[in-house]
Image: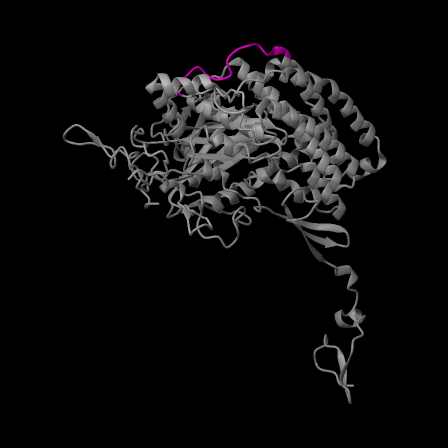
Amino acid sequence: MTTTSDPYAAGSRETTEGRVYTVTGGDWDVLLGGDAQGEERLVVNMGPQHPSTHGVLRLILDLEGETVTKARVTIGYLHTGIEKNTEYRTWTQGTTFVTRMDYLAPLYNEAAYCMAVEKLLGIEIPQRAATIRLLVMEINRIASHLVGLATGGMELGALTAMTNGFREREMCLDLLEEITGLRMNHAYIRPGGLAQDLPEGAVDSIREFLKIMPKRVADYHRMLTGQPIWQRRLKDVGYLDVTGCLALGVTGPILRSAGLPWDLRKVDPYLGYDTYDFEVPTADTADAWGRYLVRMAEINESLKLIAQAVDRLEPGPVMVEDRKIAWPAQLSLGADGMGNSLDHVRHIMGQSMEALIHHFKLVTEGFRVPAGQVYLPIESPRGELGYHVVSDGSTRPWRVHVRDPSFVNLQATAAMSEGGMIADVIAAVASIDPVMGGVDR
Amino acid sequence: MTGPGDRSGADPSVGVNASSDGFRKGAFGVTGSGDTSGFGGLVRVEPGGAVALHSTERPYGGYFDEVTDALIEAVGAATYEAAVQRVLVDRGEITYFVVREHLLTLVQALRDDDALRFELCSSVSGVDYLDSGGPVATPDRPRLHVVYHLTSMTYRRRIRLEVAVTAEDPHVPSVTATYPTADWQERETFDMFGIVFDGHPALTRILMPDDWDGHPQRKDYPLGGVPVEYHDATIPPPDTRRAYR
């Protein structure tokens, strides 16, 4: 038998049939010398295509056995350059771009962007538009929390939570489709108001939803809250206290699960939230379990808000009076189910040259926004969603920067998961509930 | 895309001009501005553009005076004078224009002083003011701005700090030691604008691939057209579309 100097090479011998190798293995102790178990360090790459990372999120985990010693997060796989794109579109077109960022909370993006533009313009929207904005945003919050619960449940193996969560979310999306025309990426909220008024029958559908949904929330509590497996997967997992949250800039349900009732709807009200009766749910456990309870409680609070908003709806305009800002044709469905207001088309095509010019100018060139910058934060389902919008006085934004709560909150992944088990990383990330469309923008 | 500084129509020194015969010329066929309508030169943008050059006189109104007084007391009048170039109150928001040498002193005081308590750094973002309707960017009017939005949860107040640097010397001290949340946000600002945050623990690209060239959100970053696989057609970059020549 001949051996080479390479300790990893297999032994071999020459025979009349040729060279025969002898592969044995099992000699790690000899090769490494001593106890290799104590220094076992494994680097595991999770994602970006992984069913348990809540989207195209990549986690690089250093493991000792099953304990995570280091967690690194890599993002950017869904970067689409939306912020840059808005700089080459009119202020109104910007709505259709920002709605695609956090795709589970599109109406929050639209509302925050439009409120920032309105602050730059110095205009106030009609009361009915404000009430409907609040209404659709709260429906959207329920849908978003349900997806957070559904995907989080799926990642932890609770498949019924997933099917049920998406079932109820479908009810929310049906409502939003009835109101805005689209299930997602609505472009419904526009600078100055709304694209269109509530359609006939929408209020009845919302009231129907308000009757069904509380029973379904109770079902969730029956299915999950008392269930020992669900509790053990979530309790004391992904711990982050108030100090950690503030240092890392974490807001939303994660901060509230640590006990601080910080909700911009209460502390910095907009759209008249201060005139509504609702609570800010908190927990004191600062873990994934607390976040689950906070989100469930927030669904109930959103239902309260929706009920109050529906009662407050008064007839009135949903767009500002200023014809230099308001879209020239109020959209209204024709007999074929689509298209502009026929009265408006008749007006610009047959009666008024000036109206045609105005329509053309406003649609192609857009309106001008006085120079300056604003920062407008609102409470999205994931925390503080802030729009930093800069205008140079032209028809397009000079800069739109989005402080997306998912982006900031995701920084807490390492703090939540280092020192824990690898299985708990999944629960921790699910409890952050990041939406990669918003993280990468 | 034409070169930087060619935002004709927006800049009163080029483009739209009242000629000797009293007619304004250059209003149509605007190029290089990114305006796809072709009419961008019709309305003159105010000189100075997006960056207001004046400073608001005191009293600022609201809680702004209280915050400013507390800040002066916390860092000392001499440091405040040296650190804050201008203060602008606009649309109910206050902006402190800060020189980078004193940024860390200010944010430390803003976070830790009992009368200030800006516990949360809400947002860090960059803005490139290259030719934003004003005179061409010069060393005393730097084009790259870093904008910090600070929130005091105790007092429920918000302020904005703004640091301006040139593209030739884009260095700003990192605030991550005071606000760890600025970590990713500074990385994003570096990625998009090429602003280097000195003292950042790991300043690498975050959204773009590691080997990417250039910083996409800068205004002089060339825009690409979309290659379409149909008879060799190409969609031109958005800033060159529909320019009526």
The residue under the point 63% across, 14% down is: A310
Residue A319 part of the magenta segment = yes
Q: Nearer the viewer, residue A334 or A400?
A: A334
Residue B228 part of the magenta segment = no
Quadrant occupied by the N terminus of chain A: bottom right
Residue A235 placement, left or right of B231: right
Highlighted magenta segment, given as a residue range: A311-324
The residue under the point 71% across, 82% down is: A4
Residue B141 placement, left or right of B161: left
Residue B237 occupies which quadrant of the picture? top left
Residue B166 percent location from the top left of the image: 37, 44
Q: Is residue A424 above or below residue B96?
A: below
The residue under the point 57% across, 24% down is: A180
Residue A220 percent location from the top left of the image: 78, 28
Q: Is residue B129 visible?
A: yes
Q: Is residue A258 visible?
A: no
Q: Nearer the viewer, residue A315 or B156?
A: A315
